[in-house]
Image (tube, rainbow, N blue to C red):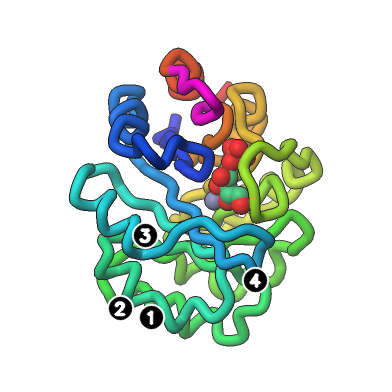
Amino acid sequence: MKKQILAPSILNADFLHLSKEIDIAEKGGARFLHLDVIDGVFAPSISFGANIIYSIRTYTNLFLDVHLMIENPSQYIADFVHAGADSITIHAEGAIHLHRLIYQIKGHGIKAGVALNPATPISLIEPILSDIDMVLLMTVNPGFGGQSFIKEVLSKMTMLSHLKSSKKYSFAIEVDGGITPREALWCSQQGANIFVVGSYIYYKETDSEKLQAMKNIKKS
Ligand code: DX5
Ligand code: ZN
């Protein structure tokens, strides 16, 4: 069985007590912290930027998995690297020079991921699959936590996994949006190995038992 990685997203966390929220993720066995940067243009809400990520970096050694949902990401890559990102994932939609952007990220010595919205086909990134460390399949439309999982993305996941094994690519497959243990199991069965989980954990009251339930996802 391949490594399953839990990546709590703090988008719905209590920002007044962020350090406590991060403690809960760490104690629950998370290895990644998923950081959703949204600019209100690429996707319809505004979250936080590099300064918050810098503060988080001073507090935790978790792998900081930065998901950029912003226009013109190229302009801000260096800021997020200096803030302490361990990986930066950019969206394929609208990125005219996607290959260049990937190497801009990798040039800083960190991992590069590419995200696809639910309606975006895998074929859009097929030519660059050997260049990337991770494919993030959005299982909701980007912008908010707490939305329902879009089941149709599962067939895309199957397609991506087949491509990965037939061409012997090494990228990880991350899923993001509407994930609870049930959806994580479905995704795991289709080859996903990094599970972003936001509101399931960080909704009103954080529940560390829920984190434990996420951690126990097995590929069956
Ligand atoms: C949505 C973000 C997600 C979101 C996940 O734009 O990319 O990471 O925070 O939250 P849940 O798990 O609530 O869908
Ligand atoms: Zn995300």
Q: Report the amino acid beneath label 3.
A: Ser
Q: In this view, does 44 lie to the left or right of 64?
A: right
Amino acid type, label 2: Gly
Viewport quadrant of the C terminus:
top right
**Is residue 151 visible in this depiction of the protein?**
yes
Q: What is the magenta range?
A: 201-207
The residue at 50%/64% (across/down) is 68
What residue is disc 2 on? 107
Magenta stretch, main secondary structure class: loop
Q: Which of marks 4 and 1 is nearer the N terminus?
A: 4
Crowd rating for badge 4 (residues with CA inside 10 Å; few <14, some 14–19, many 20+): few
State how far apart marks 4 and 3 are (Cα): 22 Å
Marks 2 and 1, how far apart in space?
Answer: 5 Å
Labels 2 and 4: the sequence-earlier one: 4
Mark number for residue 87?
3
Residue in the picture at 30% in, 78% down: 107
**Mark pair 2, 3: CA separation:** 12 Å
Task: Name which quarter of the figure residue 175 lies in.
Answer: top right
Q: Where is residue 176 in the image (x, y as percent from the top left)?
A: 59, 45
- Residue 162 in sight: no
Q: In this view, does 115 lie to the left or right of 55?
A: right
Q: What amino acid type should be assigned to the residue bearing mark 1?
A: Gln
Question: Of the residues shown, which amino acid type is indicated by label 4?
Answer: Val
Residue extending furthest toward the top: 209
Q: Are circles 2 and 1 on residues that touch, CB within 8 Å? A: yes
Per the image, label 4 sits on a secondary structure element best described as loop
Instruction: Tell which circle, 4 or 3, labels the residue nearer the N-terminal end.
Output: 4
Question: Closer to the camera: disc 4 or disc 1?
Answer: 4
Taking the view exactly as shown, the residue that stands out farthest to the front is 16
Q: Residues within 10 Å of mark 2 (few under 14, many from 20)?
A: few
